Image (cartoon, coloured by chain):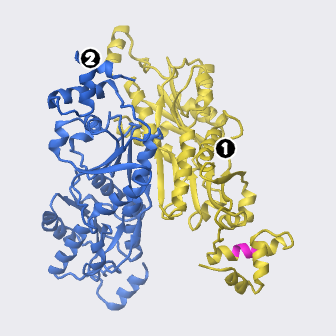
Chain colours: A blue, B yellow
């Protein structure tokens, strides 16, 4: 293991200066400090911790609201802190920008601020530190992002395959055969996972799996304008959405176009945000148990810090059935009421 | 929650008799006791536990050796106990037979013996209790078996997808293009997962994925007689095996047939049993970190007992490179040494 002397030797400066830089002394220039920290990371230096000293963790968060109880991230952070703080850790919540990620490598940032580990929320695949995670030596848990073959990095989330299977089989039981999918842009790991899980669940249930049944856009409005009418024209009788907010927009948009929910179209969301009980109609959705996600995030991080290389930890998904899903509408070309009811009961 | 009175009412017997049966009193017939236990499970009865009382867990084990340090199950059990016992649990290790599983439903067995939860090792898909796990209300962690949509049941294992990817990409880097797979029979969840992961890793690495490149048998000897010669005739230059013991048998068999390992054929196993360092040559293999599996099994079980619905917990896989893998042999039809070396360096 590298020592302060190793860092001093490599940079040709005194041990005292290295020590000052590592401890964030203010009489050292920022450039020199950065240089020392980067060299320390490069050499694999680890700070020696005194017993009883403060043990610091951080939650690094981006693209996710978390400050109010109805925000998605709020309970995840709560669950994490409910486990970490009684175990003696202090937890900092830090919103991160792309600029911050570009100014320091991930391990340098963690060493600079004396964090033993972090829980990462809301990162997309294009975030600069996503590359750093492949080679990082810092214990790190990613919510909804997966890094292969680095024993210091774990992934925590719900089982999206199970969630999608519950959603599709629920619709199938209600007689739906043509099911569409509306999604946020596929620029994040989790959107790719859900997209794949959707088609996999269709096949698993013996339903037609056609790429044109899915549409994704970065903006919800674009998704509503471009893909929703297209899916309706294709004759889908139900739509699963990658997020509750997309599902809610789809319900409103469908209703404005004269479709009744769930009589004409069934809609299912993902997440079970607090809003879902109060949409019109209340939304059937795949629940992410957020307090449990936060607690699991802490456990996985503690394991990684103790050398137990948790790669993936998935919580069971559950489907919360409300009123946005109902029996499939009988196709228009089935033209007698009697025939219709026969068709229905055969599902 | 059901009470002793509810059970007594349902069976038309006294509370005292129910209580005796639940506590295993010897002056109650076995039939009556079984009846009481089954009714208790049916009604969702839970024993009230006194603070300070013994809290009991069990490890139910089948089809897996565990008594000696070189056995696969030994360290899994050790890791579990290293976590469970300091936390105040007593842990019983119970070999289970099909007969036992047929004589009691799983939840009845657990109630009868007053176990709060169990860790299940070595079960195949045909084990009678595998059906019970779909509806069980007992906290249960399955090593290498997955049950969908029951929040009381979790799955712990290594990430076989990652392990297979590490094995295939290692071989690809060494110039192998035709890779075969020998497996134990596909009657267990984990064999199905590895089989699928093998073909997925081939595709991921842009290698030809042909079902005939794989063979599986219940008995190792059958696998060696039936599938190994077939794969060799197909011209594979490397074989990945679902277990170290198959890999070891394949090395011996290949050598008896005049093939050199790894000059003519590279072999990779799965598990990293202690024997792997001492095979001839020492075996390259995907390691299952067994102490960590045991510890993770305990953590997942503790979480389930606390209502955190862990569905899947996968440890990072790692590839232990020894001497059974080497550069791919140049095809026989490449007939000049110069050409051969050119072909080699282009990989």
Image location (x, y in percent) of residue B40: 68, 75
- Seen at 41% across and 35% down, the residue is A50
Q: Point out the image quarter for the C terminus of chain B.
A: top left
- Look at the numbered discs 2 and 1 and tell me whether their residues touch, using CB distance below 8 Å: no
Which quadrant would residue A133 be assigned to in this image?
top left
Q: Going by the image, does B311 lie left or right of A258? A: right
Horizontal side of residue B71 vs A87, given as left or right: right
Please tell me the numbered disc located at residue A29: none
Q: What's the magenta region?
A: B34-38
* Res B182 seen here: yes
Taking the spot 13% from the left edge, 66% from the top edge, the residue there is A221
Disc 1: CA contacts within 10 A as few (<14), some (14-19) or many (>=20)? some
Magenta stretch holds residue B307 = no
Q: Main secondary structure of the magenta part?
A: helix
Task: Estimate the x, y position of residue A70 in percent, counting from the top left.
Answer: 27, 69
Q: Quadrant of the N terminus of chain B?
A: bottom right
User: For mark 2, does the 10 Å Cα neighbourhood hold few (<14), some (14 to 19), or many (20 or more) residues?
Assistant: few
Which residue matches tag 2? Answer: A10
Residue at point 78%, 80% (across, down): B16
* Residue A158 higher or lower than A225, as above or below: above
Residue B270 locus on image (x, y percent) = 54, 35
- Chain identifier of the residue bearing label 2 in the image: A
**Residue indicated by mark 1:** B64
| Element type at mark 1 | loop
């Amino acid at each position: 293991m590298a020592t302060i002397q190793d860092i001093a030797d490599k940079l040709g400066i005194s041990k005292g200066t290295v020590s000052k830089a590592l401890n964030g002394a203010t009489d050292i220039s920022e450039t020199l400090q950065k240089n020392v920290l980067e060299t320390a990371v490069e050499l694999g230096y680890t700070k020696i911790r005194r017993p009883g000293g403060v043990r610091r963790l951080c939650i690094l968060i981006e693209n996710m609201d978390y400050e109010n109880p109805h925000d998605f991230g709020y309970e995840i952070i709560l669950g994490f802190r409910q486990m970490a703080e009684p175990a003696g850790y202090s937890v900092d919540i830090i919103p991160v920008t792309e600029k911050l990620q570009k100014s320091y490598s991930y391990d340098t940032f963690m060493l600079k601020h004396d964090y033993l580990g972090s829980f990462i929320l809301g990162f997309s695949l294009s975030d600069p530190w996503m590359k750093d995670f492949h080679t990082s030596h810092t214990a790190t848990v990613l919510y909804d992002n997966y890094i292969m073959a680095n024993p210091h990095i774990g992934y925590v989330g719900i089982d999206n395959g199970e969630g999608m299977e519950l959603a599709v089989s629920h619709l199938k039981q209600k007689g739906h055969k043509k099911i569409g999918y509306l999604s946020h842009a596929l620029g994040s790991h989790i959107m790719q996972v859900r997209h794949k899980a959707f088609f996999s669940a269709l096949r698993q249930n013996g339903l037609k799996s056609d790429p044109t049944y899915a549409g994704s856009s970065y903006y919800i409005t674009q998704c509503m304008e471009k893909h929703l009418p297209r899916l309706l024209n294709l004759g889908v009788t139900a739509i699963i959405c990658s997020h509750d907010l997309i599902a809610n927009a789809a319900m409103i948009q469908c209703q404005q176009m004269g479709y009744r929910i769930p009589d004409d179209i069934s809609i299912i969301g993902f997440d079970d945000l607090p809003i879902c009980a109060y949409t019109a109609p209340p939304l059937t959705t795949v629940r992410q148990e957020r307090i449990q996600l936060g607690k699991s995030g802490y456990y996985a991080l503690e394991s990684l810090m103790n050398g137990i290389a948790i790669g993936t930890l998935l919580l069971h998904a559950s489907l919360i059935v409300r009123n946005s899903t109902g029996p499939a509408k009988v196709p228009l070309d089935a033209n007698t009421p009697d025939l219709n009811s026969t068709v229905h009961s055969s599902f």
